[in-house]
Image (cartoon, rainbow, N blue to C red):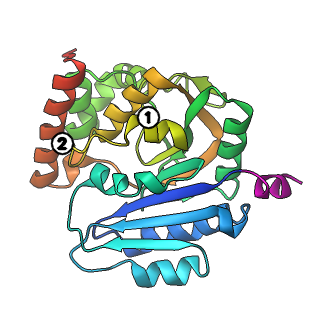
Amino acid sequence: MADDVIKSRKSLTVSIVTYRSNCEEFRRTLSTLREAVAAYSSEKVRIFIIDNSPRNEVAEIAGSELGGSSVQILHGHGNIGFGRAHNLILDQIGDYHLILNPDIEMSADALFAAHDFLECNPDCGLVTPQAHWPDGERQYLCKRYPALFDLILRGFASRSVTKHFDHRLARYEMRAETQGQIYWEPPIVSGCFMFFRGNVLRELGGFDPGYFLYFEDFDLSLRAGKKTSVAYLPAVKIVHAGGHAGKKGWWHIRQFARSAVRFYRTHGVKLL
């Protein structure tokens, strides 16, 4: 059986960075993660929860949702940013490593599908899933190289404005390419769910710690694409509740702008 096969295979680590996360969303994330890792032998799975919050707000939730799973909680380092927090456990990652947001619900077979795909495709080092919003609408995690105009439209414009640019946004979000078939080499994939071959992530050095929040996944995707093949895999299904930086207040808008400047300085500006 497939479950028996995966138990004999390689190790898996998962890292989740939290900062004052929505408790109910986080519970659902851990609940679906628990179901997904059930396909593995327990000794081959390690889950790292890196809590950037001022107070340890996740230990009780992790204990109740993950039970006897091998979980390690890191806390007390302060709010060091998304990428730097994931990098704290870079030297401990397994043969395969999942970077996971605390607002993701995954299908029970998501990790098996990603794991099996990488086993069968040794040239592939990074898998990205098919995603939906909580209301069932498709969410597109693959992107072309971002023009500044696209970022402004997608992050800050109202629906009354974006509807006039839907064809442009559809191209940027690769909607036609990322439907029901595997798609190879999307330039950029979302950091909410990145299933890596462990040695690839280690060789990349993880996230660039110069990004505090936003665009660290864009940067990592582009660097990964130079080292390995990247695949959109629709058999891996998730629900993602995040996004919408422009609706989270001025602090998030400033972080978005600061990271965008760093990204374009590193990789080159595209205006339109």
In the picture, the quarter occupied by the N terminus is: bottom right
Residue 100 is situated, as x and y percent measured from the top left of the image, at 46, 54
Q: Taking 117 as reference, is 144 left or right? A: left
Residue at 40 percent across and 31 percent down: it is 221
Residue 97 is situated, as x and y percent measured from the top left of the image, at 53, 50
- The reply to whether residue 257 is in sight is yes
Describe the element under mark 2 as helix, strand or loop. helix
Q: Tell me which numbered mark, 2 or 1, is placed earlier along the sequence.
A: 1
Residue 57 is situated, as x and y percent measured from the top left of the image, at 33, 79
Badge 1 crowding class, 10 Å Cα cut-off, few under 14, some 14 to 19, many 20 or more, is many
Observer-nearest of 80 and 239 = 80
- The single residue placed furthest to the right in the displayed view is 1
Residue at 23 percent across and 55 percent down: it is 81
Residue at 34 percent across and 57 percent down: it is 88
Observer-nearest of 194 and 250 = 194
Q: Are marks 2 and 1 in contact (CB under 8 Å)?
A: no
Badge 2 crowding class, 10 Å Cα cut-off, few under 14, some 14 to 19, many 20 or more, is many
Q: Which residue is under mark 2?
A: 256
Q: Which residue is under mark 1?
A: 189
Q: Amino acid at mark 1?
A: Val
Look at the magenta stretch and give its main secondary structure: helix
> In the displayed structure, would residue 103 be above or below residue 125?
below
Q: CA distance from mark 2 to mark 1?
A: 17 Å
Segment tinted magenta in the rendering:
1-9
> In the displayed structure, would residue 115 be above or below residue 34?
above
Instruction: Count every numbered label the image shows and give the total.
Output: 2
Observer-nearest of 139 and 96 = 96
Residue at 30 percent across and 49 percent down: it is 83
In the picture, the quarter occupied by the C terminus is: top left
